[in-house]
Image: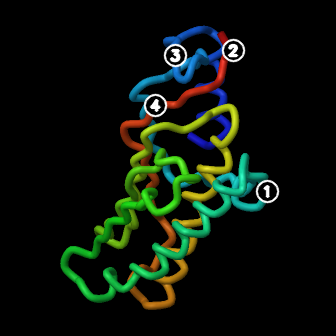
Amino acid sequence: MDINNIYNQIKNKFDNNDCQFIKINNKLYKELFNYKYMTEIFKDNRLRNEKIIPDSIHDKKERQKILQEVDKNFNYFLDDLYTRQFVIQLKYNDDKNLASCLSLLQFIMRNNILNTFVFVRSQNFGKNFLYDNQTYIFINDLLIKKLQENNIIKNSKYLFSKVEVHITSLHQEL
């Protein structure tokens, strides 16, 4: 399944009212709660190569912060040859402008396959779905490159999972 199929599945659910309405700050949102998907990392290079504009400067800052954290924590793959895993939990308390939607990133190496688990509290489908997923692909690409440079992984096969996600899209104002 590629990003276009996932995107279209979610869009169809919103368009066909297969989701609930919730009220947040006097606005109605359509919500897909606990929507899960797992896929081999998007083979379609469109998402890798396309210039996707972030919804806000805060989204751009978040991407930069995540990539820095991944780069900084990469040594856990080098230091611990038996477990080969690390977790990044972003701290948003330092910057009130960043939303705390992305909760946790977990990276686990097993059998020369990099597994990335992305735990997201909420993702705005109407604004950042493609940008956020492109960020997760960039993270995987960075890790694969570093793993190959350190002769830890011979192939570029890896999995991408988003677990326990609900996606909201602004529907209308009350």
Q: Amino acid at mark 2?
A: Gln
Relative to 115, is 120 above or below?
above
* 10 Å crowding of disc 3: few (<14), some (14-19), many (20+): few
Residue 17 visible, this orientation: yes
**Numbered badge on residue 166:** 4
Percent coordinates x, y for residue 124 in the rendering: 60, 35
Disc 1: which residue: 50
For the C terminus, the quadrant is top right
| Mark with earlier residue (2, 4) | 4
| Mark with earlier residue (4, 3) | 3
The kind of secondary structure element at disc 2 is: strand
Q: Is residue 102 left or right of residue 98?
A: left
Disc 3: which residue: 23
**Numbered badge on residue 113:** none
Mark 4 against mark 3, which lies toward the viewer?
A: 3
* 10 Å crowding of disc 4: few (<14), some (14-19), many (20+): some
Mark 1 against mark 3, which lies toward the viewer?
A: 3
